Image (cartoon, rainbow, N blue to C red):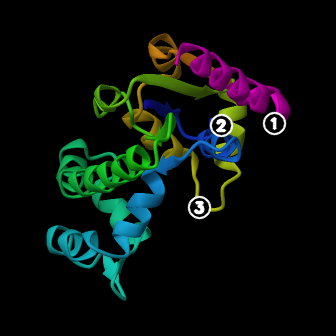
């Protein structure tokens, strides 16, 4: 089974690209969705213990958590030490199910693939990219985003150029949906030819 690590900086179109792989019949494990579920479940009491006042009605309130960790690398590491092992457990369950179903290719949608040494858990990296102007425009169009928050998030992420250099394949979403879809299909054809 080939494990594709799908990654890309904020606003590059990674979630849209993950949906394209899923539409092509490839199982996708979404780390962000897993974190979201954990924030409403197993992780909530652990995060509340470490960051009091950040859980409301049994779920982590990201707006309350954000000021505790953004721009504070050491504090962010404390949060990651709570959340990352739980995400890995969910990831392993996904991979086990995919192996039992005899899937030939799976996608691991991991936002901080290189930043967390996640490339060691996959067979290859697909990096989703776009021009910086397009990235900024997409991110700042989000309702809860500010220029400061955008730059704080970028600080935590490896520069796009370095991600591109480490990639086995690129998907450029700045060209539009159909060209991105064609790039995804080309990647899947290339991998099928290798099996």
Where disc 2 sits, the SS reads: helix
Rendered residue at 43%/47% (across/down)? 98
Residue at image mark 2: 136
Q: CA distance from mark 3 to mark 2?
A: 14 Å
Badge 3 or badge 1: first in the primary sequence: 3
Of 151 and 83, nearer the camera is 83
Percent x, y of residue 43: 26, 69
Residue at image mark 3: 144
The answer to whether residue 72 is above or below residue 113 is below
Of 133 and 130, nearer the camera is 130
Rendered residue at 27%/74% (across/down)? 44
* Range of residues picked out in magenta: 172-195
The answer to whether residue 30 is above or below residue 37 is above
Do tag 3 and tag 2 residues touch (Cβ < 8 Å)? no
Disc number at residue 177? 1
The answer to whether residue 6 is above or below residue 161 is below
Where disc 3 sits, the SS reads: loop
Percent x, y of residue 165: 48, 10
Disc number at residue 13? none
């Amino acid at each position: 089974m080939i494990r594709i690590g799908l990654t890309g900086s904020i606003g590059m179109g990674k979630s849209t690209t993950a949906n394209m792989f899923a539409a092509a019949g490839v199982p996708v494990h979404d780390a962000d969705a897993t974190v979201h579920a954990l924030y409403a479940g197993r992780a909530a009491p652990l995060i509340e213990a470490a960051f009091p006042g950040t859980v409301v009605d049994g779920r982590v309130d990201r707006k309350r958590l954000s000021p505790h960790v953004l721009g504070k690398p050491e504090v962010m590491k404390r949060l990651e030490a709570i959340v990352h092992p739980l995400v890995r457990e969910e990831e392993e369950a996904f991979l086990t199910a995919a192996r039992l179903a005899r899937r030939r290719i799976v996608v691991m949608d991991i936002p901080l693939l290189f930043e967390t040494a996640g490339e060691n858990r996959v067979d290859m990296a697909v990096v989703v990219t776009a021009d910086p102007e397009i990235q900024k425009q997409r991110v700042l169009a989000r309702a809860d985003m500010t220029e400061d928050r955008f730059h704080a998030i970028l600080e935590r992420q490896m520069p796009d150029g370095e991600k591109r250099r480490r990639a086995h394949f690129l998907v450029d979403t700045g060209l539009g949906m159909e060209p991105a879809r064609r790039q995804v299909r080309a990647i899947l054809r290339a991998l099928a030819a290798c099996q």
